[in-house]
Amino acid sequence: MKHLHQRIRDDIEAKIMSGEWPPGHRIPFEHELMAEYGCSRMTVNKVLSTLAANGLITRRRRAGTVVAEPSSQQAVLQIQDFALEAARAGVEYRFRILHRSVEPIDAAAAQRTGLPVGTKMLCLSTLHVMDDVPQAFEQRLINLATVPEADKEAFKDDPPGTWLLRRVPWTDAEHIVRAVNADGSMAKRLQIQTGTACLMLERRTWQAGAFVTEARITYPGDRHQLVGRFSPVA
Amino acid sequence: MKHLHQRIRDDIEAKIMSGEWPPGHRIPFEHELMAEYGCSRMTVNKVLSTLAANGLITRRRRAGTVVAEPSSQQAVLQIQDFALEAARAGVEYRFRILHRSVEPIDAAAAQRTGLPVGTKMLCLSTLHVMDDVPQAFEQRLINLATVPEADKEAFKDDPPGTWLLRRVPWTDAEHIVRAVNADGSMAKRLQIQTGTACLMLERRTWQAGAFVTEARITYPGDRHQLVGRFSPVA
DNA sequence: GTTGCGATAATGTCTATACATAATCGCGGA
DNA sequence: TCCGCGATTATGTATAGACATTATCGCAAC
């Protein structure tokens, strides 16, 4: 092993992961680990601090350090950028803005976003197409109070999602994934049969408390899936 | 602010989040921050190291530190434990094991899991019910080579997922979310109409390279959704 | 027995310093 | 002009020590 703190970390992680140290088990005190590895307390402390930050262990002054209870199950899902995905797969990607308008927010959306009714929003409907096959339909609201420059943007080169991601950093996001049956107009847009199961991904993002954008992306269920790989430790 | 490193961190995070320091912007060198805050390099280093671990900044020796490009979009979804969710909602939760057998793994599952064909698996089908309404149907494979004690477990008090989570720590997980139309038997089990859009969550977990379990959970699309809230920094 | 308080022990933060490592810059030679 | 190599520089890791903070333990007074 190259670095001391890496070795200590791996040892402790292995003991926790293998179940040798089950949840609730008391981990050796810093001075004990110091002696065991023949290193300074700072080194041990760094290891234990990062493990605590990762949620693997719980530390309390005077009481000591114990293995944390298993956290609630979480899935981390990658949400692929269409252009990138297409480039990797070697297919052609296009998008088409089907609708564009500036409108005061309606009651339902105001409820969801926490904005006052009547706030001016840029409303965009975009169809994402790969190799002439529709892949997703995106309905997006952009808060012009937070992102005024969006009003002047033509979205010629980049679709709204990509443009926003590059321009506006976000601090909080909320995701909802649900399954819906395609209604007539959605089926027509996506070239699928009415009633086909679709994945609908809804994402709302905020920047330091200010609402930025809401996206509702509908994928044909038979063409798309969300995939994620996850390890609990960094 | 209570602690120095906290203040430095908050300052830098604020500058990044506000867009004052856009992606690619060079962050002051450690010795510059030392001077600015009148502290030692270790303190600055700790802050920058954790920010780098969180993916907010990118550090390279000699070249310096820059604000990272916005990470690819990720959704962190909470996968609720049925019993917990029911308790919070104040409704009754029950589960019923519909099928149980030990079988050699078939070719398709062997492909997915990377196990050799013929490995003995515990196969369980579980229906999750809240207030007499079916909420999800779970098909699970448990690798008896990794979790031999599962064979002797009756799953009387806890459903297989909860039991496993408590017993076997995991190091890697893969998630797939897709939308499917309910076929006849699924519709019957979940008391929905044939063709209704359903969310199917597929999760495979490993422990240090050894396959543990695969779960395929089907939720009626109109009764369930996956929700996640996500902030990029801890 | 119960309560309160001081001693104690563990983690949390911070400093000053040292040496290692890696990447870049710029100079000199081919 | 271009290539290679050494000097430089910023980060990476580690040390030893100091003081702060906060639970907990145990003793003493009630």
Image (cartoon, coloured by chain):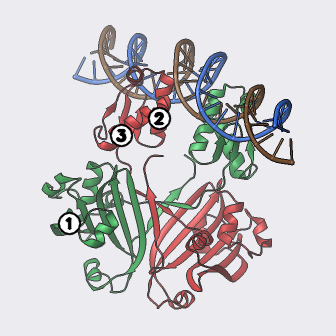
Chain colours: A green, B red, C brown, D blue
Against A119, residue B58 (above or below) is above
Q: Residues within 10 Å of mark 1 (few under 14, many from 20)?
A: few
Secondary structure at badge 3 equals helix
Q: Quadrant of residue B158?
A: bottom right
> Which quadrant: the N terminus of chain B?
top left
Q: Nearer the viewer, residue A120 or A186?
A: A120
Q: A150 or A8, which is in the foreground?
A: A150
**Can residue A129 be seen from the camera position used here?**
no
Are both tags, 1 and 2, on one chain?
A: no
The chain identifier of the residue carrying mark 3 reads B
Q: Residue at x 71, y 29 (%)?
A: A34
Q: CA distance from mark 1 to mark 2?
A: 39 Å
Front in this rendered view, residue A19 or A41: A41
The chain to which mark 1 is attached is: A
Say which of marks 1 and 2 sits in front. Answer: 1
From what the image shows, is residue B104 above or below residue B8? below
Q: Dot 3 corresponds to which residue?
A: B14
- Determine which residue is flagged by label 1: A118
Q: In x, y percent, where is residue B164?
A: 69, 65
Specify whether C20 is left or right of B12: right
As drawn, the label of residue A53 is none
Q: Amino acid at mark 1?
A: Gly
Tag 2 residue: B6
Disc 2 chain ID? B
Q: CA distance from mark 3 to mark 2?
A: 12 Å
The three-letter code of the residue at mark 3 reads Ala
